[in-house]
Image (cartoon, rainbow, N blue to C red):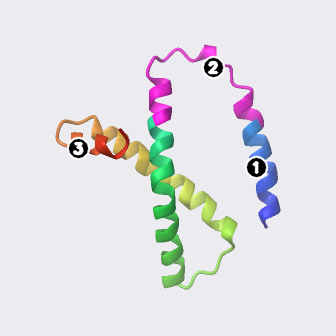
Amino acid sequence: LFLSLIPLCFFTFYVLSHINITDIKHPGFFKHIRTLSSLIFYIHLIVLAVIRQLFITLKIAGPETGFFIPVLIITLLSSEIIIFLSNKKTFNFLKHLYL
């Protein structure tokens, strides 16, 4: 089952390595990607632990690769939500998570 991740990693690396960075015109793009990568690094293990515990509690048996997609989606969404809320005045304290 882990063998299915090899083509995924290959094609993801291939696509990402052929992106021309000079085509990106948005000035805050790289800062946003840096913040997003930091939050993903900090959050993904917590999300993985919660999803594993949820699968154990609900007695859902799944392969380890079955955790990849839910962890990816929840981690990306929660990171984007944290970035969005940290730009609001009332949730400005969230910037301390990644600065």
Q: Amino acid at mark 2?
A: Ile
Looking at the rendered structure, the number of numbered marks drawn on it comes to: 3
Name which of mark 2 and mark 1 comes first in the sequence: 1
Q: Residue 30 in magenta?
A: yes
Identify which residue is drawn at 49% across, 77% down: 53
Q: Amino acid at mark 1?
A: Leu
Name which of mark 1 and mark 3 comes first in the sequence: 1
Residue that numbered label 1 is attached to: 8
Identify which residue is drawn at 48% across, 18% down: 26
Secondary structure under tag 2 reads helix
Q: Is residue 57 left or right of residue 64?
A: left
Identify which residue is drawn at 50% across, 26% down: 30
Image coordinates of residue 76 in percent, x first then y, are 49, 48
Q: Vertically, is 41 above or below 55?
A: above
- Label for residue 21? 2
Image coordinates of residue 77 in percent, x first then y, are 45, 49
Mark whose residue sits in front, 2 or 1:
2
Q: Are marks 3 and 2 in contact (CB under 8 Å)?
A: no
Q: Is residue 84 left or right of residue 73?
A: left
Residue 76 seen in the figure = no
Badge 3: residue crowd in 10 Å (few <14, some 14–19, many ≥20): few
